[in-house]
């Protein structure tokens, strides 16, 4: 029999197995986050540099109407994008799961990811402009042309298009694990189709619904490229504000405060998701 490992040997095993991953998280996740947190309490110098002393002024600026409006608009985009993704993605997930050629359909669903994100956003710009394909179809039907770009609608359409697969895939995974015998039992007990679906099928897809909603809502709130290209300054989200502070304005301290605020909001959303779904649901999301 092998002798019990000494504390030094156990420490060595931990360092060998967990050490590389822990070092990676420390250097590229925890340390940058702490630096951003520290920068949020500093001030902008005359040339854009960070300088002391520590202050809460950057967080107090978040209460100004312009920034509250940007946060409210970001929240609206996140909620609407999640809602429309659910309306489109939920039945689509069932269709994919029940289709005999679902492997091919899943490939088609993921095919846009083989194209650069910016190219896909620019494609929407071409489609929605005044002389674009959408307005040409509307004009042929006697409904146009309409001002579709730049607009909030253009930003919302491109956001839903971008993140729809992130909703479909978790729901698809839940549909694949549905026990259809429960549906048959509901029918045997005299339940109508809608009632049978609500009580026998829908609860089994809750993990996918919650995971898909989180995977759409969180990035939809923080995105800035879609609003920057398709909003053309008319739609300003919190992601656009962060990009401006670190770019044109060079106010890194306030940009860091905006970033910390957004991270805190995302962590709160994940905490609520974990409370609703439990640790298993959070593991499935990850």
Image (cartoon, grey):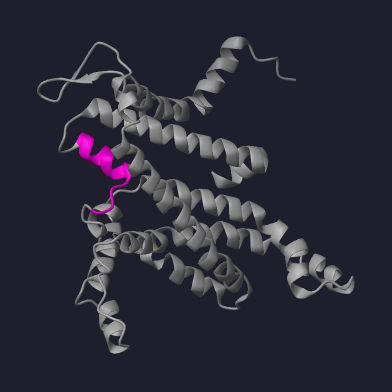
Residue 125 point in image, percent of width and height: 24, 66
Is 250 positioned to the left or the right of 195 in the image?
Answer: left
Asked where in the image residue 206 lies, by quadrant, the reply is: bottom right
Residues shaded magenta: 234-246
Q: What is the residue that sits farthest to the right in this orientation?
A: 189
Q: Residue shown at 55%/70% (left/top)?
A: 92
Depth check: 144 or 107 in front? 144
Q: Nearer the viewer, residue 56 or 266?
A: 56
Residue located farthest toward the left when viewing the structure as drawn: 47
Residue 264 in the image: above or below residue 129? above
Residue ID at (29%, 13%): 54
Q: Is residue 280 visible?
A: no
Which quadrant holds the N terminus? Answer: top right
Q: Position of residue 193 (x, y in %)?
A: 76, 74
Q: Quadrant of residue 182?
A: bottom right
Q: What residue is shown at x 30% (from left), y 48% (from top)?
A: 224
Q: Residue 77 at x, y = what percent? A: 40, 53
Residue 267 as seen in the image, left or right of residue 26: right
Whether residue 239 is in magenta: the answer is yes
Judge by depth and name the residue closer to the eye, 138 or 91: 138
Residue furthest out toward the front = 65
Q: In which image quadrant can residue 270 be found?
A: top right
């Amino acid at each position: 029999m092998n002798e019990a490992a000494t504390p030094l040997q156990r420490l060595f095993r931990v360092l060998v197995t967990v050490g590389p991953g822990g070092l990676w998280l420390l250097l590229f996740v925890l340390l940058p986050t702490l630096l951003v947190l520290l920068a949020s309490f500093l001030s902008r110098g005359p040339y854009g540099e960070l300088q002391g002393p520590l202050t809460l002024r950057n967080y107090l600026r978040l209460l100004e109407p312009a920034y509250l409006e940007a946060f409210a608009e970001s929240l609206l985009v996140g909620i609407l994008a999640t809602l429309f993704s659910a309306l489109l993605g939920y039945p689509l997930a069932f269709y994919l799961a029940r289709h005999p050629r679902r492997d091919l359909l899943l490939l088609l669903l993921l095919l846009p990811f083989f194209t650069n994100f910016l190219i896909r956003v620019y494609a929407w710009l071409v489609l929605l402009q005044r002389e674009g394909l959408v307005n040409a179809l509307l004009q042929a039907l006697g409904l146009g042309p309409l001002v579709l770009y730049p607009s909030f609608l253009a930003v919302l359409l491109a956001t839903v298009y971008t993140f729809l697969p992130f909703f479909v895939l978790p729901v698809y995974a839940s549909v694949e694990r549905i026990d259809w015998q429960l549906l048959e039992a509901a029918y045997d007990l005299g339940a109508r189709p809608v009632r049978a679906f609500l009580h026998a099928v829908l609860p089994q897809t809750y993990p996918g619904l919650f995971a898909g909603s989180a995977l759409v809502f969180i990035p939809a709130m923080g995105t800035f490229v879609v609003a920057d290209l398709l909003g053309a300054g008319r739609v300003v989200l919190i992601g656009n504000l962060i990009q401006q502070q670190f770019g044109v304005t060079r106010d890194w301290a306030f940009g860091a405060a905006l970033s910390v605020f957004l991270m805190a909001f995302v962590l709160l959303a994940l905490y609520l998701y974990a409370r609703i779904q439990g640790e298993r649901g959070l593991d499935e999301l990850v």
